[in-house]
Amino acid sequence: MDHVAVESPDPARCGAFYERFLGARIVRAEGHPLMAYVQGGAMAIHEQGGPGTHVAFRVSEEERRALRAKLDEAGIPNEERDHEIAVGLFFEDPDGRQLEAITYRGVE
């Protein structure tokens, strides 16, 4: 698993909570969601109206392309989104949970 993404009306306030109570390391980068790293895991805290709550799994480019082919073959809607530092393939599981298969640029 790469990260869990959530939305917040105030990402800074939300990040401060995780920093104060769980010891999260907070990383802010212009144009990207606030990242909270807690106990080896990562949480992307987006503004409301972002990509929605989802779970992301890190995959290679080859794995992402193969997954997309399988999803297409099964008739499961999916969408690739360019995040500048990565490409994410978004789709839903049978219960409607949003998932992302993410490939970071320049990382094998």
Image: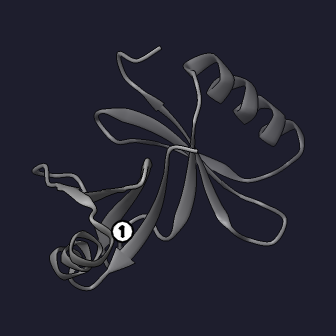
Residue at the bottom extreme of this rendering: 9
Please indicate whether residue 63 sits to the left or right of residue 7 in the image.
right
Please indicate whether residue 48 sits to the left or right of residue 78 in the image.
left
Residue 40 is situated, as x and y percent measured from the top left of the image, at 43, 47
Q: Nearer the viewer, residue 50 or 41?
A: 41
Q: Residues within 10 Å of mark 1 (few under 14, many from 20)?
A: few
Which residue is under mark 1?
50
Question: Is 22 placed above or below 80 here?
Answer: below
Under mark 1, the amino acid is Gly
Q: Nearer the viewer, residue 23 or 67?
A: 23
Residue at the right extreme of this rendering: 74
> How many tags in the picture?
1
Residue at screen point 27% across, 65% down: 23
Q: Nearer the viewer, residue 79 or 60?
A: 60
Question: Is 18 placed above or below 9 here?
Answer: above
For residue 19, which quarter of the picture?
A: bottom left
Residue at screen point 63% across, 29% down: 64
Question: Is 7 placed above or below 29 here?
Answer: below
The quarter of the picture where the N terminus appears is top right
Residue 14 is situated, as x and y percent measured from the top left of the image, at 26, 79
Residue at screen point 42% across, 71% down: 6
Please indicate whether residue 91 sits to the left or right of residue 55 in the image.
right
Residue 74 is situated, as x and y percent measured from the top left of the image, at 89, 44
Residue 87 is situated, as x and y percent measured from the top left of the image, at 44, 35
Q: Nearer the viewer, residue 67 or 34?
A: 34
Q: How is the image coloured?
A: one colour
Q: Secondary structure at mark 1?
A: loop
Residue at screen point 40% across, 18% down: 107
